Each structure stands twice: as C-alpha cells, then as structure tokens.
Amino acid sequence: MMGRDWRQRGYNIAAMRDLARGILPRPVFDFADGGAEDERTLRRNESSFSDIALLPQPLNGAAERDQSLTLLGQKLSMPVIIGPTGLGGLFWPDGERCAARAASRAGTAYCLSHGSVCTLEQLAETKAAPRWMQVFVYRDRAFTRELTERAQTAGYDALVLTVDNQLLGNRERDIRNGFQIPPRFGALDMAMMATKLPWLLRMRAEFPRLTFGNYVRPGKPENLKTLAGRMNLLLDPSMSWADVDEVRKIWRGPLILKGILHPDEAAEAVKRGVDSVVVSNHGGRQLDGAAASLDALQGVLRAVDGRIPVLLDGGARRGADVVKALCLGAAACLIGRPALWGVAVNGQSGVAHVLDIYRREIDRTMGLCGVTSLAGLGPHLLLPKGALHA
Ligand SMILES: Cc1cc2nc3c(=O)[nH]c(=O)nc-3n(C[C@H](O)[C@H](O)[C@H](O)COP(=O)(O)O)c2cc1C
C-alpha cells in the first residue's frame, strides 16, 4: 500500500471500513456492508448507541483496567467476540483461518460461519480457541445433526444456532450490483477495477477454490454457484422450538441461540436449556424494520433475569458502544463487518488491528468512566433514558 502504513490510516473502525472500501471491488464491499431493503435496521443498529449517554465517575480512580471476563466457562481477554460471517475467504486468501488465529492470539473467541470457505475441520486444525461453530436448521434435519456432530468431533467450544435466517433477506445492493457467487467480472467491471488490482491478484488463485466448504460432499464436487442456490432451498422456514430441543439433545457443550429480539423467545430459550442468546438482527441483513439490537436488549435482559449470559451484536463500532451495551447488562458483544474490514485490509494482522482498536477504546472508556473491571460497569454509569435531550 502506498503512503502511510495502513495501521496509521486505519486508526478506528470507520477508517478500517474506508480502507476496505478502497481495496474491495464494489460488489464484494457491498455484499458485506449492505443490509436488507431500505437498510433502516442496519442504520438504527449503529445510531441506537448515540441514544445512550455515559455518566462517568472519574473520581473513582481507575489507574489500571482489566477488561477480561469468563463466558460460558472460557476466559476471554476482552468483551468482543468475532461473530460468524459467511464467505470470509472472499476478502483475503484463507480469510477465516486468518481471523480465527487473530482472535485466538488476542485471547478472544471466533465463531465460524456455516458458510465459510474453509471447512470446520480445516479451521479446527489451526487450534484457534475458543472456537464456536454456527449452524442452521435444515429441511434435512440429518444435515443439521451431521454439522453439529462434526463440530463436536472437531472440538468446538460452543454451538451457535442462528434462527433469523430461515428465509434469505432481500439484499437489494446485491441485486443492483449483480453480485454473484463466485464473483464474475465483465470487461467493464475489469476496467473499473484497475484500483482493485492488488485484491484481484491476491484472490485470483483462490477463485477456483472458493466454495462453501462445509457443504461439499466427498466425491460430489459442486461449485459455489450451485451450492449457493441449493443452500437457500436447504433452509427450513418451519423451524420451531422442537428443533432447538433436538439440537440441545445432540450438542453436549454450550448452546447459543443467535437472532433473538423478542423477550418471550429469550425466556423460552432459557426454559429449553439454551446456555446463552445473541440479541441480533443479523446486522440488518434479514428483516428490515426489525428492532435494533441495542433497543431490544433490555427486554431480553428482563426476560432472562440473569439466568444466562446475554450477548449482543449489530452496530458496535466503538469501544464505548461495547461499554454501553455492557452497562445495560450484556455480557459481551459480537462484531461482524468490522472483522471483515480487518481481513480485507491485511488478513490476520488486519483483524488483530481491529481487535486492538476495540481493546484500546474499551480500556480508555473504562478509565474515563472510573471503572477498573467489567464488574464495575452498570446502569449507574448511564444517563437515564429520556434525560438525553431534556
Ligand atoms: C457478510 C456477512 C455475512 C454474514 N454471515 C452470517 C452467517 O453465515 N451466519 C450468521 O449467523 N450470521 C451472519 N452474519 C451476521 C453476523 O454474524 C452479525 O450478526 C452481524 O454482522 C453483526 O452486525 P455488525 O456487522 O454490525 O457487527 C453475516 C454478516 C455479514 C456482514
């Protein structure tokens, strides 16, 4: 890269996004950046953090801060976890394994998407830990069972069952861009892509290998395009609590439901023996008009009433956002797009840099709030709702 070192130029998450935008072809950038339909939920995910203000207590004196926590029996060095994002290998060669290694080195968890380019076994070979595996409920329930059992055999520390993706969201940026999997570029695209040459050169050798690794059947070579088409048909919109029970029976470790916004579903999850929920709207990529994650958090927390840890994802772009979510009662935040920006900018070290940005911002926010550990965060550090514009 020309000019100053990318680390200096990517000094916060927004700057990392700008760098990624410069690197990636437009359809690939938009695939990650975009949301469903009018992107209202996507925007609200971020803006909801501005509706909450911190009330610091600097005289508490917080010379040293510790942001570590124990979550589902695992010690994490920071309250930021890399959430599942499909096709990580489209942003950088072996993108998923790069991200998992960066998370592991930073002392936090990485969740592999069902739709990763590498297989879950290949990810496990890195020994990156803690590692979580994300699955769906499929029309062929035997396939849900198979993926779950493979994750168990490969030593995953938690299983994430995503429940808000049983019908694919209407992502209009992808439609407008003619985004295809694998990417195809016509002559005009190529001319416009002169500035994206480094990405193209890096990824050229990868294109034939790009696939949804976990879906490939031995002896049945399928390309990414046919798999992508088939995958949507595999998902079952009739999924119900009976399916959660079934997965609960098969999976012996911590089970996390991702995509919970309604308090009643959170309460039911606890009853069904689920170990944690992620309050999430899939980063605004599924149901446009769904509540922002932060707006839904309090209802879920009330319903769960401290019985299981509650996680949140969607729109956390600053360490202060993570601190606000934790003050409300979340145990930790997952990040989706920011990790992809890191992968796109510089593979493993790009993701390490993204995690470092969060770590430094959380540390500074805790110090300015007068808090030495995550246990010290709570609603007493927030301006009461309604007082913001009073
Ligand atoms: C490109 C992309 C792919 C994603 N793929 C998956 C997926 O395979 N499974 C899943 O549960 N969530 C998936 N998500 C949703 C993320 O896990 C997460 O909920 C969301 O990105 C969080 O919001 P944030 O991007 O604002 O941090 C994806 C998100 C993006 C941006």
Image: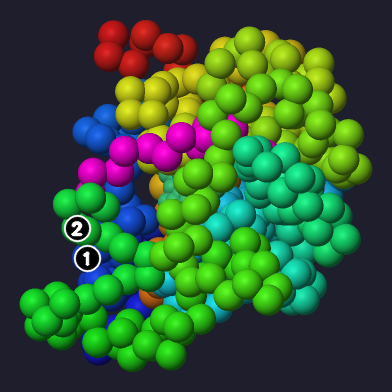
> Do the CB atoms of the residues marked 2 and 1 lie less than 8 Å apart?
yes
Secondary structure of the residue carrying tag 2 is helix
Q: Residue at x 59, y 55 (%)?
A: 113
**N-term mark: 2 or 1:** 1
Residue type, mark 1 in image = Arg
State which quadrant residue 45 falls in.
Answer: top left
Residue type, mark 2 in image = Asn
Is residue 159 rendered magenta in the image?
yes
Q: Is mark 2 within 8 Å of ligand 1?
A: no
Q: Is residue 163 above or below residue 13?
A: above
Residue ranking furthest to the front: 220
Q: Residue at x 34, y 16 (%)?
A: 388
The answer, for residue 245, to whether it is visible in the render is yes
The answer, for residue 377, to whether it is visible in the render is no
Q: Which residue is mark 1?
A: 26
**Residue 27 % position (x, y):** 25, 63
Q: Residue at x 72, y 40 (%)?
A: 141
Q: Which is closer to the viewer, label 2 or label 1?
A: 2
Left or right placement of residue 156 versus residue 295 in this view = right
**Residue 221 % position (x, y):** 58, 75
Relative depth, front residue between 22 and 329: 22
Relative depth, front residue between 144 and 279: 144
Q: Quadrant of the C terminus?
A: top left
The range drawn in magenta is 158-173
Q: Is residue 346 above or below residue 254?
A: below
Is residue 133 rendered magenta in the image?
no
**Residue 277 % position (x, y):** 67, 30
Q: Which residue is mark 2?
A: 177
